[in-house]
Each structure stands twice: as structure tokens, then as C-alpha cells.
Amino acid sequence: MNWGYSIAVAFAFFMAFIIYLVVGTYKQNVDLVFDDYYVREIKFQEQIDKSVNAADKPLKWSVRNDSVVVKFPESVDFQTLSGEIVFYRPDHSGSDIKERIFPGTSGEQVFPVSKFRQGKYRLKTDWQSGGNNYYDEQIIVL
């Protein structure tokens, strides 16, 4: 085999590799973190203020009896407590879980483990109580 033929074969393999890479990039999932990303970015200072409020009232979570339990601080008035809990899955937006806060009289909200896929979640809690706004974010692994 002469060197001209070898160069042509090498070039053909190179082109096939480039085509493989291009086709592979079109199959890659590129979900945005949030659909309303820009609106959330503008309101980010509000979230910082809420996080400062929540620094002295941290949430606790645990896994017990096939349930994920989120416990609100005892210093919070459970009668006026409202807001939203989001279990955000970084690697797959379709696995996110979003729920309204209903802590009951014990200050705990229970989520069955069967709702979750195994892996890493960000527990994002945005709540209001007694005229104050709070935001807490923690990483949990189930």
C-alpha cells in the first residue's frame, strides 16, 4: 500500500470520527436549570436576603421508615407557615419534586421515598412565617 492511499484512509477515518461527534452532540440532553432563568437571576438579591434570615433557623431533614422527613425550626409559627419545598435533581429536570408546605402541628413534613429516584438532590425550601421570608438550600443523597 502506498503512502497516498494511507493518507486517504486516515482522512476517511478522521471524517467518520468528526461525523460521529457531531451526531453525538445532537443526542445530548441540554435542559436549562429553570425555564425562567433570567427572571430568577434578577430576583437573586431577594433570595440572598431570605438566606440570611434562615441562617439562624436551619431546617433539618432525615430518612426514617421509608420516608424523607423535613423538620422546620421550633421557633417558627406553624400556623402561619407557608411556602414551597423543591427537591431539585441536578442531572435530570424530570425528576424534580415540588410540593407546598403543610407541616402540621409537629413542624414536620413527610415525603415517601418511593417518589424519589436514588441519587443526589438539592432540598430548596422557600417559606414565609410571621411576616418574614426564609430560604434554605441543602444537599441530600437518597
Image: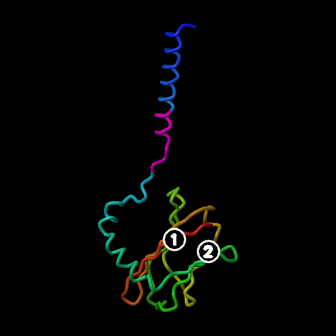
Q: Is residue 66 above or below residue 71?
A: above
Highlighted magenta segment, given as a residue range: 21-30
Q: Nearer the viewer, residue 99 or 74?
A: 74
**Magenta span contains residue 98:** no
Q: Is residue 20 above or below residue 131?
A: above
Left or right for 66, reference 77: right
| Name of the residue lying farthest toward the left | 42
Residue drawn at x 43%, y 82% as measured from the top left: 54
Left or right for 67, reference 134: right
Residue 113, position as x, y percentages in the image? 64, 69
| Name of the residue lying farthest toward the front | 3
Specify few, some or many for label 2: CA neighbours under 10 Å numbering under 14, 14-19, or 20 or more: some
Left or right for 57, reference 38: right
Q: Main secondary structure of the magenta part?
A: helix
Q: Is residue 22 above or below residue 42?
A: above
**Figure quadrant of residue 104:** bottom right
Residue drawn at x 53%, y 69% as measured from the top left: 139
Q: Nearer the viewer, residue 141 or 71?
A: 141
Residue 141, position as x, y percentages in the image? 60, 67
Residue 138, position as x, y percentages in the image? 51, 72
Would you name the residue on which mark 2 appears?
68
**Quadrant the C terminus occupies:** bottom right
Q: Nearer the viewer, residue 104 or 127?
A: 127
Could you tell me which secondary element the residue under label 1 belongs to? Answer: strand
Q: Which mark is residue 123?
A: 1
Q: Amino acid at mark 2?
A: Val
